[in-house]
């Protein structure tokens, strides 16, 4: 399986190959690269679809050290995969947490973003109070994972088709990558100058 070694972290990714425009896709919390299987089948001949497992997810292996599970590490993992594949600029897209990380990547590496695909995500919070409420709920989610294991997972259809890491790793991803730390993403929205596709589901089937 393709992977990238980054200071003791083994970041898993998949690459459909091909000569089409490159698209880097990131999954939602508790999902993995498996959630993009349908898109690869439908569009793999037209685009070069690159999928990655964030730390605490799928087949990415990361030591149980809280400081290694952060949004900045995730942004750098995304850039490192593009570097490894020799891709200077790509369409950056993601679902839920992956959509937020796509926006965060644009803040950190705007010159590397050709366009954005945002599916079922938000831009975070500008208010300290709102971030505190989110993070308190997020800590409950992490503690539930630690106490009840992966059986406590919920979410859409992307979760059951995904490979799951042990509950301790996913809990660290919740406290790190999923937490809200500042307003950089929501404050960046007026300054996005690349094309953006926003996908919002109307109802559950």
Image (cartoon, helix red, strand yellow):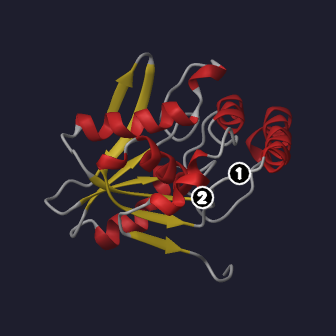
Q: Quadrant of residue 195?
A: bottom left
Residue 53 image position (x, y, % from top left):
47, 42
Quick check: 72 left or right of 43?
right
Count residues near mark 2 (Cα–Cα under 10 Å), then give few for <14, some for 14-19, many for 20+: some
Mark 1 or 2: the one toward you:
1
Q: Secondary structure at mark 2?
A: loop
Verify CB contact (< 8 Å) between mark 1 and mark 2: no
Q: Residue furthest left?
A: 19
Identified at 64% across, 83% down, the residue is 202
Identified at 58% across, 75% down, the residue is 200
Count residues near mark 1 (Cα–Cα under 10 Å), then give few for <14, some for 14-19, many for 20+: some
Location of mark 2 (residue): 96
Q: Is residue 2 visible?
A: no
Name above or below for residue 53 compared with residue 67. below
Residue at mark 1 to residue at mark 2: CA–CA distance? 18 Å
Location of mark 1 (residue): 126
Q: Is residue 73 visible?
A: yes
Quick check: 131 left or right of 76?
right
Identified at 46% across, 46% down, the residue is 107
Q: Quadrant of residue 63?
A: top right
Residue 181 image position (x, y, % from top left):
68, 38
Residue 134 image position (x, y, % from top left):
80, 48
Residue 185 image position (x, y, % from top left):
57, 50
In-front residue for pair 106/146: 106
Name above or below for residue 129 compared with residue 198. above
Q: Quadrant of residue 108?
A: top left
Q: Secondary structure at mark 1?
A: loop
Q: How many marks?
A: 2
Identified at 21% across, 61% down, the residue is 21
Mark positioned earlier in the residue sequence (1 or 2): 2
């Amino acid at each position: 399986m393709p992977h990238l070694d980054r200071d003791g972290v083994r970041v898993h990714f998949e690459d459909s190959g091909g000569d089409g425009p490159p698209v880097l896709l990131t999954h939602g919390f508790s999902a993995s690269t498996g959630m993009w299987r349908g898109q690869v089948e439908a569009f793999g001949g037209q685009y070069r679809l690159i999928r990655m497992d964030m730390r605490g997810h799928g087949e990415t292996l990361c030591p149980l050290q809280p400081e290694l599970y952060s949004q900045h590490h995730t942004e750098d993992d995304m850039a490192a995969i593009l570097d490894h594949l020799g891709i200077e600029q790509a369409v950056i897209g993601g679902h839920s947490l992956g959509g937020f990380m796509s926006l965060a990547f644009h803040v950190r590496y705007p010159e590397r973003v050709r366009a954005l695909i945002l599916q079922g995500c938000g831009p975070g919070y500008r208010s300290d109070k709102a971030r505190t409420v989110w993070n308190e709920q997020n800590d409950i989610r992490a503690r539930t994972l630690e106490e009840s294991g992966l059986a406590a997972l919920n979410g859409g259809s992307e979760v059951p088709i995904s490979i799951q890491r042990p509950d301790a790793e996913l809990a660290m991803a919740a406290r790190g990558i999923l937490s809200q730390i500042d307003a950089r993403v929501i404050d960046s929205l007026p300054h996005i100058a690349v094309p953006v596709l926003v996908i919002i589901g109307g109802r559950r089937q």
